[in-house]
Amino acid sequence: MPAYRRHDEVEFCDSTGLGVLVGGCKASRLVNGTLALVLSGDKFNRIFGATTLDKVFEIHADLDAAVATDPASVPRTALAGGVS
């Protein structure tokens, strides 16, 4: 089952935040899961590109695009809180 994390309201992310996301990605892979990120701003796309984390995470422009990559994912109502 995939996990989705929306970052559309996040204004700042330092190395600690990136480390938390990498840890979450590793944890999800241990249970054969995935962690997809919704990044809507150029600022975060540049950060993830510069750190090559764009190769580690599934990154989508919006939640609909993220959910569309896995039709068997959790119901949309469960995604409203951020992490499912």
Image (tube, grey):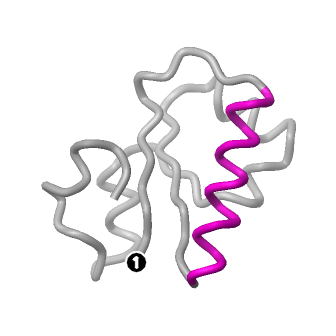
* Camera-nearest residue between 33 and 53: 33
Residue that mark 1 sits on? 1
Q: Is residue 82 magenta?
A: no
Vertical relation: 34 (above or below) 22? below
Residue 71 x %, y %: 29, 78
Segment colored magenta: 15-31
| Residue in the image at 34% along x and 44% along y | 82
Q: Quadrant of residue 15?
A: top right
Q: Position of residue 53 (x, y in %)?
A: 77, 49
- Residue 25 point in image, percent of width and height: 65, 61
Query: Magenta stretch containing residue 19, yes or no?
Result: yes
Residue at point 43% right, 70% down? 2
Measuring 66% from the left and 23% from the top, which residue is drawn there?
13
**Local crowd size for mark 1, using a 10 Å CA cut-off: few (<14), some (14–19), many (≥20):** some
Instruction: Tell me the quadrant of the picture where the C terminus can be found.
Output: bottom left
Tell me which residue sits at (37%, 51%) in the image.
Answer: 83
Q: Is residue 44 above or below residue 74?
A: above
The furthest residue to the left = 77
The quarter in which the N terminus is drawn is bottom left
Mark 1, secondary structure of its residue: loop
Establish if 54 lies above or below 2.
above
Q: Quadrant of residue 16?
A: top right
Instruction: Tell me where residue 9 sits by quadrant.
Output: top left
Q: Position of residue 38 (x, y in %)?
A: 47, 44
Please, which residue is most extreme toward the top here? 11
